[in-house]
Amino acid sequence: MTLLDRFIIEFDKGLRTVLAEAQSVRPFPDRDCNETPLDAAEKRRTAALMRINHSGEVCAQALYNGQAITARNPATEAALRQASQEETEHLAWCEKRIRELGGRKSLLNPLWYAGSFTLGALAGAIGDKWNLGFLAETEHQVGRHLQSHLDQLPAQDEKSRAILEQMQQDEARHATTALDHGGAELPLPVKLLMKLSSKAMTKTTYYL
């Protein structure tokens, strides 16, 4: 398979990530949780938080696919593909919860996907240890981001909480896997740049 063929396949994946409804192999984390009453303001805020999380998973999906296409080690590529599959499940969970809350997905998801895929491909091209280090740092930051959202959820919203808690567990495992495969610690300026970029995306997606 040529590099062009792989990019065509990835373009198709990108379209499906942004436009099609995601599917989950695993049971939905909130399947045993009861829907509890939320007032209109709580629903709007929670839907916005879940929209941010959904867009974060769009970015993660794009990052991992971009990284995988330029990864040099088959084991590295396999780890990235596995993480990407679980991010697809996260998309499905967030999409369902957004619909239940009467919200919508971000209008900027195509932009987020394109930018993240490009960034991931560049990270993969630099070398596997930095590629995996980038994955690990991404997951660490996502974990902190999810904890922040868990702290902001209405106390009675068990369904959203169950989804975010399972996502948090998955992201922590992805970070550990990346480090176990030889991921390197990223320089502090790179970590700060990633944090600033994430903050800008979060604030924009809250409204759009």
Image: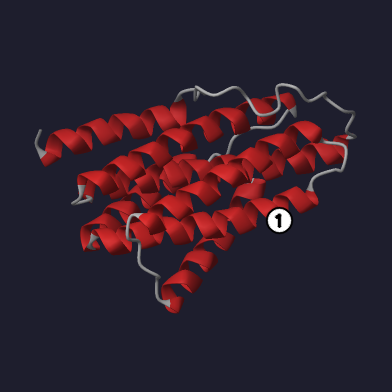
| Residue beneath the point at 59% across and 45% down | 169
Residue marked by disc 1: 148
- The quadrant holding residue 69 is top left
| Residue beneath the point at 63% across and 58% down | 144
User: Looking at the picture, how far across and down is residue 115, in whole percent?
Assistant: 38, 51
- The quadrant holding residue 136 is bottom left
Q: Is residue 9 among what the camera can see? A: yes
User: Looking at the picture, how far across and down is residue 8, in whole percent?
Assistant: 21, 33
Given residues 126 and 76, the one toward you in this image is 76
Q: Look at label 1 and name its amino acid.
A: Ser
- The quadrant holding residue 126 is bottom left
Q: Is residue 35 left or right of residue 50?
A: right
* Image mark count: 1
| Residue beneath the point at 45% across and 47% down | 112
**Image quarter of the C terminus:** top right
Give the structural element (helix, strand or loop) at label 1: helix
Given residues 1 and 82, the one toward you in this image is 82
**Image quarter of the N terminus:** top left
Location of residue 80 with respect to 27 vertically, above or below = below
